[in-house]
């Protein structure tokens, strides 16, 4: 679906039409984060099952050659009222991996201290971890009596995924193939990348009656110097800056809070509601999002609540697909 930002009805196109749908000399900004096999399944001292979803590394130590000790923020299941210092076992007969409960928080948020053999926890997780798929896909598999698929590690990634650290794919990018990216470049558009590691908070529904009271979880990002320079050059030339996904919007707008887009690492809790000002992004490629989500609110902030509601009604009528593998919406800025 193609919308003109701030007014006009919906038009329809195939995703392969993107090179001609883009405004001339557009700069596309991609999020090259890679979904890590962040779901670790283990057991408690009692033998009961537990699970940890890796969110963010806090610290690391090297207690000895061939061993690692790392503190990670996680979402934990099955630890009940286990005390701090309790130990969990996430290993296999071939790989040793244990964790100590360091800190506990609300909604399963915890800090675990992992210890094991190998260069790092991520290296071990790459062998024994599971890709954390969206809950509706996991539920459908359970209903069908199906388990994890080895194909998930590549199918739930963008074709340009590079930097491990996300627990969910930046889903606007799932539409791209190498052929479409090449066609975009051939049509005279520029393509650059940044990294924002998508966390579970992105998909946490807004439960507060007043949406402004919702608090975003922090997510880490990194903007290469070449990307910051390309964005500032496009802004100076009056060229479109196209965010491929809401994560790119949040990274660029956060990095430009002080003026020009700042290169380097950062962390963002940026929450964009209708009335927000967009300093950098002029065009947006995104998927169709669920009600009461911060993603939908960002889209409404970008182009106007009434236009988004009308577009979503048209999408439902036309049979567009929602969720991670659903269809795309391109919101085009004013010429």
Image: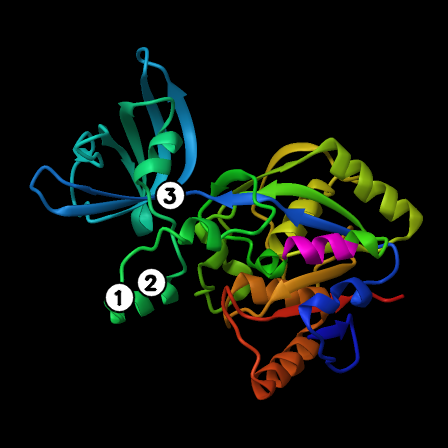
Residue at far bottom of view: 317
Q: Is residue 246 above or below residue 56?
A: below
Label 2 with label 1: CB-CB less than 8 Å: yes
Q: Is residue 193 visible?
A: yes
Q: State the CA–CA distance, disc 2 to disc 1.
A: 6 Å
Location of residue 307 (image quadrant) = bottom right
Query: Nearer the observer, disc 1 or disc 3?
Result: 1
At which x and y percent is residue 38? 37, 43
- Determine if the magenta segment contains residue 183: yes
Residue placed most toward the observer, 233 or 37? 37
| Residue drawn where x is 78% and y is 50% of the image | 280
Q: Which mark, residue 142?
A: 1
The residue wearing badge 3 is 38
At which x and y percent is residue 31? 62, 47
**Mark 3 packing: few (<14 Cα in 10 Å), some, or many (20+)?**
many
Residue placed most toward the observer, 246 or 151? 151
């Amino acid at each position: 679906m193609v919308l003109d930002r701030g007014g006009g009805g919906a038009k329809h196109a195939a995703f392969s039409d993107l090179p001609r749908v883009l405004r001339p000399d557009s700069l596309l900004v991609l999020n090259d984060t890679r979904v890590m096999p962040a779901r670790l399944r283990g057991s408690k001292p009692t033998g009961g099952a537990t699970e940890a979803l890796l969110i963010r590394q806090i610290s690391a130590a090297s207690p000895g050659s061939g061993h690692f000790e790392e503190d990670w923020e996680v979402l934990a299941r099955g630890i009940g009222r286990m005390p701090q210092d309790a130990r969990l076992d996430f290993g296999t007969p071939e790989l040793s991996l244990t964790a100590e409960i360091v800190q506990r928080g609300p909604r399963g948020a915890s800090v675990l201290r992992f210890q094991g053999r190998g260069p790092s926890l991520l290296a071990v997780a790459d062998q024994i971890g599971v890709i954390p798929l969206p809950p509706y896909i996991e539920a459908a598999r359970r209903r069908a009596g199906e388990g994890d698929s080895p194909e998930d590690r590549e199918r739930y990634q963008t074709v340009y995924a590079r930097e491990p650290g996300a627990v969910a794919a930046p889903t606007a990018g799932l539409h791209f193939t190498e052929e479409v990216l090449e066609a975009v470049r051939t049509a005279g558009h520029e393509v650059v990348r940044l990294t924002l590691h998508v966390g579970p908070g992105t998909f946490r529904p807004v439960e507060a009656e007043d949406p402004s009271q919702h608090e975003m979880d922090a997510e880490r990002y990194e903007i290469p110097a070449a990307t910051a320079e390309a964005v500032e050059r496009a802004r100076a030339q009056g060229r479109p800056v196209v965010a491929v996904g809401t994560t790119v919007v949040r990274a660029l707008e956060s990095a430009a809070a002080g003026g020009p887009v700042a290169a380097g690492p950062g962390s963002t809790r940026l929450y964009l509601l209708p009335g927000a000002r967009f300093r950098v992004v002029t065009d947006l490629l995104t998927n169709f999002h669920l009600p009461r989500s911060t993603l939908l609110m960002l889209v409404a902030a970008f182009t106007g609540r009434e236009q988004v509601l009308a577009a979503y009604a048209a999408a439902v009528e036309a049979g567009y697909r929602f969720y991670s593998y659903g269809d795309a919406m391109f919101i085009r800025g004013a010429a």
